[in-house]
């Protein structure tokens, strides 16, 4: 893990949160954090306030981003099948690529020193690996110089100036001097080291199940052995802070040593004994990412090590590290989050800025969606059925019954004691007044449209009307959207009173979760054919359901120019604003004061996949996929503020 030494104005290490991240960079004195996020690309966080760190920008490179390295107002990123990319970050809200060089399909690590980049790579076509030396004097015109093939297998390497300290699996420790057109091994030491760490002309080499070696590398051409500390542990990571050396043994714990240049390494204490994935140290703040066991999930532990012999725990959080938030509802002071195959997570959100994990509710299956009706919570399980819970005791949901029917996320709705559930082009209606004795009471189908490839994606009910939206597929494979209105005054005898068929150029389908009030139906439209269409947020007049018509629409302004329009997942209304959960594009907000002239206001980049939004009082609670959930203060919808962010994505993707 790279080390950052900048401090904020309160002299608090700005990177205390970086245990969350797989790698990171830092720009400016107090503000921005950069992290690679695999297929999501590069994510930029505003870290001016660590307690409310938030995503300000995401940048997709078109490949799986592995690592980042800092430059002068630029970031160098490496991504599989893309290569090394130089990104201009002078405007963090709009990063842009200014240079690119592709030379291998799998890139693993990048180090920058002087005017060169050193990249550990593997070429699957040629079946070879090495360290590529890249000329970056002109970031707009990077040039491949040569490859270093000395290694049998690179287990670790660090760079300082024109020297590469490299540990390979067969020949041991080497010091390589890199020139502009070639390289030369200038020093060797026979040691089967697995981890290297450089600090102030000292090189620490860890030999698995053996010892820690210290070398004086003031003159890199004369690798001078200074001392050795026997340490028969299978360690995985080394780090230093001042004169303290931290050694991580994943299954043993974290050990701390005091380093003296003359006398070598002296053991001080063992700080933690749990199975640790990785750690980050800054000053007297020690952050540990703990592996799961039978008693708990993975989690974060923060230790104050001012007194190293008596460290105190300042924070523990064992929730959601490897989760994926699919849906969220709020009941009383608790948020209930469908966390895929890890259950329903319960968070205390009475103080939104200090929301805290309480417990997990388990069930058989993967939780995909939640629906709240009074004191009952309906949980959809991976298209296999719906579990019904009683929330009379919010912290101990009691399972009342189960509906063994499969459906889609937004394809259920509750009205009084009736559960409406879509399956294909049919809506089944169940009486759930007695959850232990659930009975089907009706089946709603538009008999004029049977067997035409129709799929109902969303259900809403307004007064006596059932509103269905989805799409149908023609025999030629063309998809088109529809909206249907049924009069369900008598639910056993439903009557279809209106069909609205989209015939736009883009065949845009209203497959998002619609929202309605007495007069208007608001829909975020999704281009399911892959054509570009700007007018995507749509308002329909439904005062008279029989004469429903489109009266207003608006562009996703910051999405103009993209090949595909946004896939809207969910939609909520707050005062005169519409809030749309738009998957990887985050949250989009529209002003709907005049429904005939809605307009785009702003976006909130989330870093995950915004799939569900739940509005209560002045806050929007958002399920954000692998990024967990966050709470958005929307008292000023023109300038929403993230009050709480679980940041799961970074914990999931952390690496040494």
Image: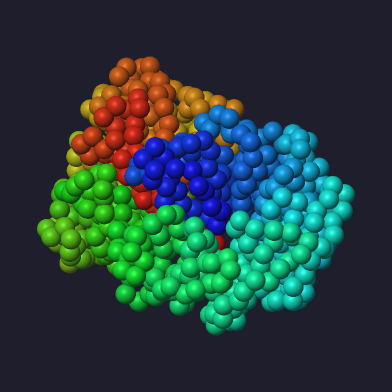
Q: Is residue 600 visible?
A: yes
- Residue 115 drawn at (x, y percent): 74, 42
Question: Foreground: 460 or 357?
Answer: 357
**Up-down relation of residue 49 to residue 637 (above or below):** below
- Residue 581 drawn at (x, y percent): 40, 39
Q: How is the image coloured?
A: rainbow
Question: Residue shown at 36%/40% (left/top)?
Answer: 10
Question: Residue shown at 51%/27% (left/top)?
Answer: 558
Which quarter shows the N terminus?
bottom right
- Residue 33 drawn at (x, y percent): 49, 43
Quadrant in which residue 363 is drawn = bottom left
Classify residue 256 as left or right of residue 475: left
Quadrant in which residue 448 is drawn = top left
Question: Residue shown at 61%/43% (left/top)?
Answer: 70
In the displayed image of the protein, which residue is found farthest to the right?
181
Question: Foreground: 501 or 321?
Answer: 321
Q: Is residue 491 visible?
A: no
Quadrant in which residue 605 is drawn = top left
Classify residue 48 as left or right of residue 363: right
């Amino acid at each position: 893990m790279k080390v950052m030494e900048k401090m904020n104005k309160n002299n608090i290490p700005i990177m205390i949160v970086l245990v969350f991240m797989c790698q990171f960079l830092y720009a400016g004195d107090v503000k921005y954090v950069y992290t690679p996020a695999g297929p999501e690309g590069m994510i930029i966080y505003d870290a001016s306030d660590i307690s409310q760190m938030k995503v300000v920008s995401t940048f997709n490179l078109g490949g799986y981003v592995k690592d980042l390295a800092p430059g002068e107002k630029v970031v160098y990123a490496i991504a599989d099948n893309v290569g090394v990319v130089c990104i201009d970050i002078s405007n963090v809200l709009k990063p842009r690529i200014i240079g690119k060089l592709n030379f291998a399909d799998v890139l693993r690590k990048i180090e920058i020193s002087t005017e060169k980049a050193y990249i550990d790579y593997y070429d699957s076509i040629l079946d070879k690996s090495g360290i590529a030396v890249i000329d970056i004097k002109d970031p707009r015109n990077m040039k491949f110089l040569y490859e270093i093939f000395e290694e049998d297998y690179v287990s670790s390497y660090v760079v300082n100036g024109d020297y590469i300290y490299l540990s390979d699996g067969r020949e041991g420790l080497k010091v390589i001097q890199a020139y502009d057109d070639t390289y030369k091994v200038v020093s060797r030491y026979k040691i089967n080291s697995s981890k290297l760490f450089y600090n102030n002309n000292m090189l620490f080499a860890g030999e698995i199940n053996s010892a820690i070696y210290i070398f004086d590398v003031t003159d890199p051409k004369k690798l001078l052995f200074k001392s050795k500390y026997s340490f028969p542990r299978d360690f995985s990571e080394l780090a230093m802070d001042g004169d303290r050396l931290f050694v991580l043994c994943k299954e043993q714990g974290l050990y701390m040593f005091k380093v003296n240049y003359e006398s070598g390494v002296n053991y001080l204490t063992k700080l933690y004994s749990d199975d640790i994935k990785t750690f980050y140290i800054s000053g007297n703040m020690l952050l540990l990412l703990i592996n799961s066991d039978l008693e708990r999930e993975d989690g974060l532990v923060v230790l104050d090590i001012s007194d190293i012999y008596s460290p105190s725990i300042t924070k523990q959080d064992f929730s959601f590290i490897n989760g994926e938030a699919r849906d969220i509802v709020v009941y009383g002071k608790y948020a209930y989050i469908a966390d895929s195959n890890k259950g329903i997570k319960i968070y205390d959100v009475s103080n939104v800025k200090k929301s805290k994990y309480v417990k997990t509710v388990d069930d058989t299956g993967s939780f995909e969606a939640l629906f709240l009706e009074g004191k009952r919570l309906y949980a959809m399980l991976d298209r296999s059925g719906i579990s019904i819970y009683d929330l009379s005791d919010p912290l101990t949901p009691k399972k009342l019954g189960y509906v063994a029917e499969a459906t889609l996320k937004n394809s259920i709705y509750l009205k009084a004691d009736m559960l409406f559930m879509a399956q294909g082009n049919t809506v089944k209606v169940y009486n759930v007044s007695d959850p232990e004795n659930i009975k089907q009471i009706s089946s709603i189908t538009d008999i004029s449209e049977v067997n035409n490839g129709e799929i109902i994606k969303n259900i809403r009910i307004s007064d006596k009307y059932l509103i269905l939206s989805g799409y149908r597929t023609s025999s030629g494979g063309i998809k088109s959207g529809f909206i249907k209105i049924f009069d369900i005054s008598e639910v056993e005898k439903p009557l279809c009173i209106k069909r609205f068929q989209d015939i736009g150029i883009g065949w845009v389908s209203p497959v998002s979760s619609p929202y309605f009030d007495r007069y208007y139906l608001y829909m975020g439209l999704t281009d399911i054919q892959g054509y570009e269409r700007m007018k995507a947020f749509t308002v329909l007049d439904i005062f008279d359901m029989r004469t429903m018509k489109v009266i207003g629409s608006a562009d996703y302004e910051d999405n103009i120019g993209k090949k595909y329009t946004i896939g809207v997942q969910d939609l909520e209304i707050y005062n005169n604003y519409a809030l749309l959960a738009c998957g990887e594009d985050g949250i989009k907000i529209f002003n709907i004061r005049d429904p005939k002239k809605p307009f785009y206001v702003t976006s909130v980049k989330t870093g995950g996949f915004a799939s569900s939004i739940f509005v209560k009082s002045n806050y929007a609670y958002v399920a954000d996929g692998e990024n967990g959930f966050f709470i958005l203060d929307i008292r000023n919808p023109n300038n929403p503020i993230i009050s709480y962010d679980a940041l799961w994505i970074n914990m999931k993707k952390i690496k040494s």
